Amino acid sequence: MSDLLNDIGRCISESCAPCSALRAILHPRDRDLGGFSVRRLLPAEEVRAVGPFVFFDHLGPAVFPPGQGLDVRPHPHIGLATVTYLFAGEILHRDNLGHVQAIRPGEINWMTAGRGIAHSERTPPELRAAGHTVHALQLWVALPEEFEETAPDFCHYDAGQLPTVERPGLSVRVMIGEAFGAASPVATFSPTLYLEVRAEKGAEIPLPDGVEELGVYVVAGTLRARDRQIAAHSLAVFEPAPGIVLTAAEESRLVMIGGRPLGRRTVWWNLVATRRELIERAKAEWRGGLFPPIPGETEFIPLPGE
């Protein structure tokens, strides 16, 4: 009898795994970035980070008429890597290492700030003249403490370099990390996972096992975790548990993020660090014009409040 009761208890526990492992559902806050707005999910009051991810912005789809576009002027970063991913449109990246790189849908820009880097993000001139739509995610990944002052770097990965896995009702692009039997070539400083998933209505979506912290963001559509609904533009954060399976209540697009947590970080403006003195140093250097200039740029964003 005791074995039977144990089996029943185990079945009940497993059948409710998606619900019991659901730590929080985060909803976006709109942020005006000057001419366009974004949905910001991280950092949130209840969840500061998911694995190494300390920042999550969702832009668009934003429609720009002819003559208008994105103009994120030069600004600094420290202690993190930025990850830019587009669903539609194009953004031109420039940095003070001399890189000039257009990013298009399905590609990954991974910029390691480390000790300090400055960059700009703008709409290319030809798209600005014609009018266009931009739909993108920008995430920040904290660097482990031993690497937070590493030399800055920039890497670009074409869409063809990032593997796609097809499952019944699912298409999974492995952008960073390993999952569904495929591995991304993107080099990271700590275990990191970033997937894009397209799901048909009714498709079951298994969450990768063995990820220390995991979040699922619904770009479009609706997901179900048994009796819980995860609506579009919500970020569901899960505790580590095996066998979690979500269901697409309608045709949906989502991303999964996660990995090894790196401990508390101070996030001030575009600067991330384990120690406040590193942020104060970066502020003084930016204020004093000590970051190397970005070729082709003459503007800059001043420190907040200055």
Image (cartoon, helix red, strand yellow):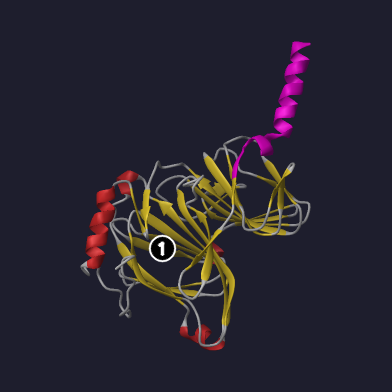
Q: Nearer the viewer, residue 77 or 85?
A: 77
Assess whether residue 19 is covered by the magenta stretch: yes
Lateral position of residue 194 relative to residue 306, left or right: right
In the displayed structure image, the side of residue 23 where residue 148 appears, left or right: left
Query: Which quarter of the picture shows residue 96?
Result: bottom left
Residue 184: % across, % down: 52, 54
Residue designated by label 1? 155
Measured as percent of width and height from the top left, residue 261 is found at 45, 42
Residue 228 counted in the magenta span: no
Residue range (magenta): 1-24
Kindly give the residue lying farthest to the top in the view shown: 1
Q: Please say whether residue 126 is visible from this viewpoint.
A: yes
Q: Quadrant of residue 290?
A: bottom left
Q: Is residue 251 left or right of residue 70?
A: right
Judge by depth and name the residue closer to the eye, 105 or 148: 148
Per the image, label 1 sits on a secondary structure element best described as: strand
The three-letter code of the residue at mark 1 reads: Cys
- Give the quadrant of the N terminus: top right
The picture places residue 139, in percent across and down from the top left corner, at 48, 58
Q: Position of residue 41 (x, y in %)?
A: 53, 55
Could you tell me if residue 187 is visible in this image? no
Residue at the spot 41% in from the left edge and 42% down from the top edge: 262
Position above or below: 222 against 212: below
Alpha-carbon neighbours of circle 1 within 10 Å: few (<14), some, or many (≥20)? few
From the image, which quarter does the C terminus lie in?
Answer: bottom left
| The one of 70 and 260 positioned closer to us in this rendering | 70
Closer to the camera in the image, 299 or 116: 299
Main SS type for the magenta part? helix
